[in-house]
Image (cartoon, rainbow, N blue to C red):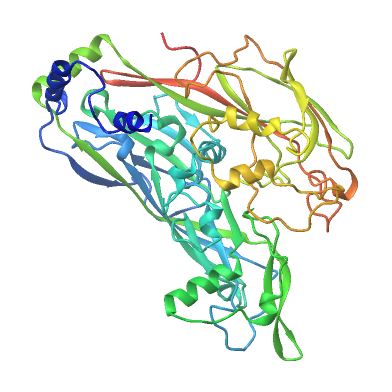
Amino acid sequence: MNRNNNANTKNLPTSGKVLDAFKGLNDIIPPNDGTRSFIQLSSEAYDISLPISGETSETTIRLTHKDHMVSQINDSFLQVTQNVTIQIPQLTVELPVTQNDTTIPYFFFGYKGSNQMFRQMKVLHEGRENTGYMSQECIREGFAYSNLKPITEKRGKRGIHSTYESVSVMGSDVCGVYVPLTDFKNGSKSATIQIKSLIPIDDLLPFQSFSIYPSKLMGELAAKVQFSTAGLVWCMVPSQAVLDITNFMNNGIATLESTFAAIRGYDRFFHQIGDAGNIVDYIDVAGAKTATQARVTPIVTSFTVTHFKCQHMGFGVTPQTFDAMSSYLKSSPILLPAQQLQYFAYSTTPDASSLNASMQIPFENVETLTLMFPAKTQQRTVFTNPCIRNLQLNIDDKLFPPTAVSTVTDIDPEFLVYQLNASDLDGVIEPTKSFIQSIVMPRHNSSGTRYVNTSFDNTDFMCDFSFERSQGGSVFDGFTTTTAVNVKLQYNPVYTGNNDVYYIPDSSNTALHPPAPQVCLCRNTFWELGLGYVNYHNKGTPK
């Protein structure tokens, strides 16, 4: 049995007919109608000179290059350099003592995914805003798209993805930087960091299905974007990881400074920029440096984009092939599947005992509905399990799920399967550890008391309901209504009072309560690519 399975993976003939297998060898090398002209070209942002700053400044970047007959959009990528000034007002003034890397806390500042740094994007054709594509939810789109990528697509992608698995060991394969706490220990308590990022074009949700694109026939594409730092995340790097890296790089044998090692209550998970979190700081006790737990809130005071380029991959084809492609496009435009996220927020906020909220939403080719439960208004890419029960949506008198469910898998283990199925992560594809921990990690002990600390990052929580069979957006049979319909959401907390981790996200501030839950609709859309034109269809079904 094993021998047969091994043979099937070795490019050996699967047919018992030797003659057919022998003839098939002639098809291994396909005929080539390229012109041996593959080349990488680059272009810079235009129409506004760099650097640019602020969330309302727009600039445009070419996605194809005029010197390519055929662009390989799926292999092309954007390069972005941001200078971000971050302030941590709560830090005390630096102590006049000798410090080294084994006793200095380190922060991580960066993005979970590089595709989460645009606030808004429009797609241009031949320099004109005439494709019909525009999104103001690029941060949320980027998070939803990247969060469901398997770990194999994130591991090792420096400048593209940041997993807590990498940050927790101070790994280099992150989209962000590590900054020592002492960089903020000055009079203004701020520091300017530089984040260099790479954005594969097919990591942007509307371009996920693009591959080869004959720009000489269809026309040049560009993207007009606005940048934002609202998707930034931060955390303190575990102290042991800093020590291990320092010892290894310097062939050292140092141990953690005793007062530093004694602090256990710093957070082991991502925070959204502007959210408070626990770290280790130093204070002066009788003239001596002593480590202590501190609660700080890093904020962005300014940012500029100093570098924005596109690296284009492409090649040429023979005149015969070019003419044949042109003839084909005259009668047969190319239809490519795409997706777009539509965002809504309920107007009713939770109370201490339940939520029963409704709003009117139109549905058009909805593949997946995602419920998000932000603890604070600024959260865009950081969400934790609300630990609720009796969760159910009533959409136009249809129940999702059919039986109310708890998001706590100790109560309803099937909730994990629901999420894996809806995310197409239920097979051999391995999700990230943070994605799984966000669903299954207990936030209470067996008696219902909330845990003081969290052992691993749990900020990738999404509550997905699938409305379409699993086909990767290529089959348009998602949920559609003719008008806006009532979308009713209800649930109750699993635990009440100070143990309600959703209604009271911060046990030290019982007056702080979350904003209303949010709904994100992932809708199937499509591109129509023809001879000399590109149209984006956010409604309807390909014919």
- Residue nearest the viewer, comparing 4 with 51: 4
Can residue 92 be seen by looking at this rendering? no
**Image side of residue 371 versus residue 524, left or right:** right
Query: x%, y% of residue 300?
Result: 59, 59
Quadrant containing the N terminus is: top left
Q: Residue at x 61, y 42 (%)?
A: 436
Foreground residue among 543 and 449: 449
Give the x, y percent position of residue 342. Answer: 58, 28
**Viewport quadrant of the C terminus:** top left
Please give the name of the residue rendered at 84% of the width and 45% of the height, measured from the top-left corner.
500
Q: Position of residue 291 (x, y in %)?
A: 70, 78
146 relative to 266, above or below: above
Q: Residue at x 89, y 36 (%)?
A: 353
Question: In this image, 435 relative to 218: left or right?
Answer: right
For the residue pair 366 and 237, the one nearer the viewer reads as 237
The image quadrant that residue 389 belongs to is top right
Q: Is residue 329 above or below residue 445?
A: above
| Residue at the image position 58 percent from the left and 70 percent from the top | 240
Q: Is residue 402 above or below residue 315?
A: above
Near-viewer residue (410 or 476)? 410
Residue 423 position within the rendered picture, expressed as x and y whole percent measured from the top left:
56, 31
